[in-house]
Amino acid sequence: MANENKPIHGIWGSRWVFILAAAGSAVGLGNIWKFPYMTGANGGAAFVMMYLLCIVAVGVPIMVAEVMLGRRGGMSPVNSMFKLARDNGVNSRWAGVGALGALSGFLLLSFYTVIGGWTLFYVWEMVSGALVHASAVEVQGAFEGMMANPWLVLGGHTAFMAMTMFVVGFGVIRGIERAVRILMPLLFALLAVLFGYALTSDGFADAFRYMFAFDIAKISGASVLAAVGHSFFTLSIGLGAIMAYGAYMPREVVTRSGQRKPVSIGSTVLAVAALDTLVALVAGMIIFPIVFANGLAPGEGPGLLFVTLPLAFAEMPLGMLFGTLFFVLVVCAAWTSSISIAEPPVAWLVEKGFSRPKAAILVGLLAWTLGIGSALSFNVLADYTLFGKTFFGLMDFLTINIMLPVGGLLIAIFAGWIMKETQARKELAMKSFGLYMVWRAMVRVFAPLALILVFAFSLWQALAPADEAVPAEPVVEEAPATPQAQNEVPLTTEAPQ
């Protein structure tokens, strides 16, 4: 059993390493700049309960399927799906599912590192004290000035891409595993410190009511679809990252007593989903006490992260220290996500005969080059649009609204309808047959239907005429509206999320 389909890239040192790596992939900017606001604006505890139901019914079943396919294949998503198609006697074109995931991740990487570069800039802004005692107009101006400076945005994009490919270039064990063993505990430690500070804030009670007051009246059809969609996107499903990480997941571990114990995919995925949700909720209870204590309006997206919060840090005692800690936390979250989405194409090139460092350099250069268009979308190329969207906007729309849902849907179809049940049951090794049948029903029927609804709704929203769109609330009451809308900064980026 231990040697069956042994991955050629290495095996995680333990089940917990996989949990940390997968959680690092899932915990991204969306956990920090989107989910907390979604919770407060859509009924608080009522939305959280609905979201958890969606996680269990949609996100977890498909993530279990993607991990299962990855571990069964033991290779990059492309070659894993090719192998599984052959083993199940179906057309080899099903390898396209893996290729679609890897391509989605590659496109997302090209503009995710642009946003990652912004986070590096704000670490420097906090460390240097540039925003200490800054006014709302000055904080707004700092963000607009950064976005308008093509060399600054390109420099951040370059640095974040280099950080990402440096880790991936060292391989699964010496690179990615070492990184997540450091970055994820650091992220959790920073969360704990910042949460402890938030507990002492004057705005903690207001933030708690905002996020957890049970308001069923705010639950609507749109909020249900938002919960379903976020439950899918937050777990980095459909990007190839989870399939690649699943390929490195051990089938069994040796206990302290020397016994060999099978590693359950189901319980492991549940642990990842629980960590991802916990981080999102704690992030909200860090952010909104600071926002409310300084008399600012809650919001979401880059406006919250790069305008509202820096203004709050500028006005609060020890703002320089806690602002630095917060943005280091954001860098950790973005870095672990970018590492995961870079791995699938690099693994595929390694299987084609490239050395790991050369594969990482090649993927990094190609993604960096493509990302130039996204980096310049906020300045030099801001006036050049297609279908009303800048290059950045097109990349975001294509990956988030089209490729990810389609990829997740195809994963569910293959795992639920194409893969032989004997293989699925053997790989999942669920002790309860009833639990297996529940998973099978979810991945065959409920999750695909939910994804189709979310896909249709997101397309309708994205393609709706501008006068039908709901205007965004100002993020900072005292400052001009953020450049969020005009620059098409995505509110849905997860990566994810």
Image (tube, grey):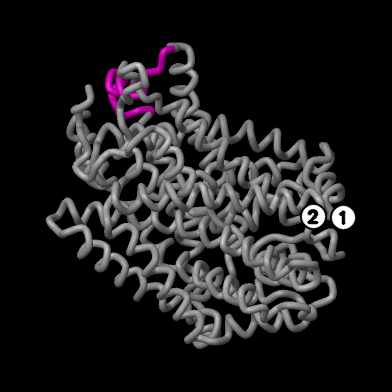
Q: Residue placed at 83% from the left, 65% from the top? A: 296
Q: Is 324 above or below relative to 496?
A: below
Give yes or no for contact between labels 1 and 2 (Cβ–Cβ under 8 Å). yes
192 within the magenta span: no
Q: Nearer the viewer, mark 1 or mark 2?
A: 1
Q: Quadrant of residue 12?
A: top left
Would you name the residue on which mark 2 appears?
289
Give the CA distance from mark 1 to mark 2.
7 Å
From this view, report whether residue 385 is shown above or below residue 176.
Answer: below
> How many C-alpha atoms fall within 10 Å of the one at disc 1: few (<14), some, or many (≥20)?
some
Q: Tell me which segment is drawn in magenta.
A: 416-431
- On whether residue 424 falls in the magenta region, the answer is yes
Which residue type carries mark 1?
Answer: Asp
Q: Dot 2: few (<14), some (14–19), or many (≥20) neighbours within 10 Å?
A: many
Residue 48 versus residue 467 in the image, above or below? above
Point out residue 110 in the picture as x, y percentages from the top left corner: 41, 67
Identify the residue shown where x is 36% and y is 50%.
Answer: 178
- Which disc is residue 126 wearing? none
Question: Of the residues under marks 1 and 2, which one precedes in the sequence?
Answer: 1
> What secondary structure prevails in the magenta region?
helix
- Can residue 312 be seen here? The reply is yes
Q: Quadrant of the N terminus?
A: top left
Whether residue 93 can be seen here = no
| Residue that appears at 68% across and 54% down | 194
Amino acid type at circle 2 is Pro
